[in-house]
Amino acid sequence: MEEGIENVKNFKLTENNLKETKKELFRQLENPKNNNFAYLLKKELSENKFTIQELEILIKQMWLKILHYITISTALFYLAVITLPYSVSTRYPKGDLYPTKIYNRRVPIVKKLPDLISLQSKTLIRLNKYCTEYIFNQKQ
C-alpha cells in the first residue's frame, strides 16, 4: 500500500499528459453494465471547470480512496476466509469436541494468531482512517 500511496503522491498532471490521463481515467471507470458514471465524469471534465491543479488533486484523492478500499477489503476478506472454519467450530462445538483441547500452541493457526491479530488491528485502523477521511468527511 505504501508504494501505491507514494506513486499517487508523485503523480503530476501537466498540459502534456492531460488528454491521455483523462482518456485512461474514463477507460478505467467504464462499466459495461452502467456507463452513467463515466458519462457524467466525461461531461464534467470536458466542460473544463477544473484547473490542471484541481484535477490533479481530484485524481489523487480518488486513487487514495481506491487504494485504501482495496487494501482494507482484501485484508478483511482473507482474514474471514482463514478464520471462518475455526470460528464456527469453536463457537458451535459438536458432541464432545472441546476447542480448548484442540487448539494449542502446536496448531498452525494458533502459531500465526499474533500475526493475524496484528493484521486485523492494522486493517481496523486503516478502516477507521478511511471512514473518517472519506466517508464522514463531506467537505471533499
Image: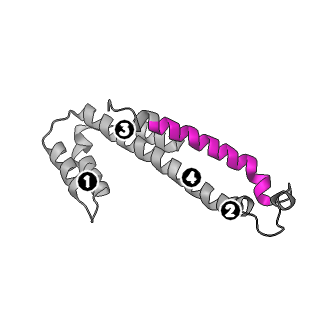
Q: Residue placed farthest to the front in the image?
A: 95
- Nearer-N-terminus badge (2/1): 1
- Nearer-N-terminus badge (4/2): 4
Q: Residue at x 74, y 50 (%)?
A: 113
Marking on residue 58 = none
Camera-nearest label, 3 or 2: 2
Q: Amino acid at mark 2?
A: Val
Camera-nearest label, 1 or 4: 4
Indicate left or right for 36 with 139 as reference: left
- Nearer-N-terminus badge (3/1): 1
Question: In terms of secondary structure, where does tag 2 sit?
Answer: helix
Which residue position is annotated with label 2? 88
Which residue position is annotated with label 1? 26
- Work out whether residue 10 can be spotted: no
Q: Estimate the spatial distance between the alpha carbons at disc 3 and disc 2, rounded to whole Å.
A: 39 Å
Instruction: Where is residue 80? Give x, y as percent.
Output: 61, 57
Question: In terms of secondary structure, where does tag 4 sit?
Answer: helix
- Nearer-N-terminus badge (1/4): 1
Q: Estimate the spatial distance between the alpha carbons at disc 2 and disc 1, rounded to whole Å.
A: 44 Å
Q: Amino acid at mark 1?
A: Phe
Indicate left or right for 96 with 86 as reference: right
Q: Residue at x 68, y 62 (%)?
A: 88
3 and 4 marks in contact (CB < 8 Å): no
3 and 1 marks in contact (CB < 8 Å): no
Marking on residue 76 = 4
Q: Magenta residues: mostly which secondary structure?
A: helix
In this rendered view, identify the residue nearer to me: 58 or 36. 36
- Is residue 118 covered in magenta? yes
Question: In terms of secondary structure, where does tag 3 sit?
Answer: helix
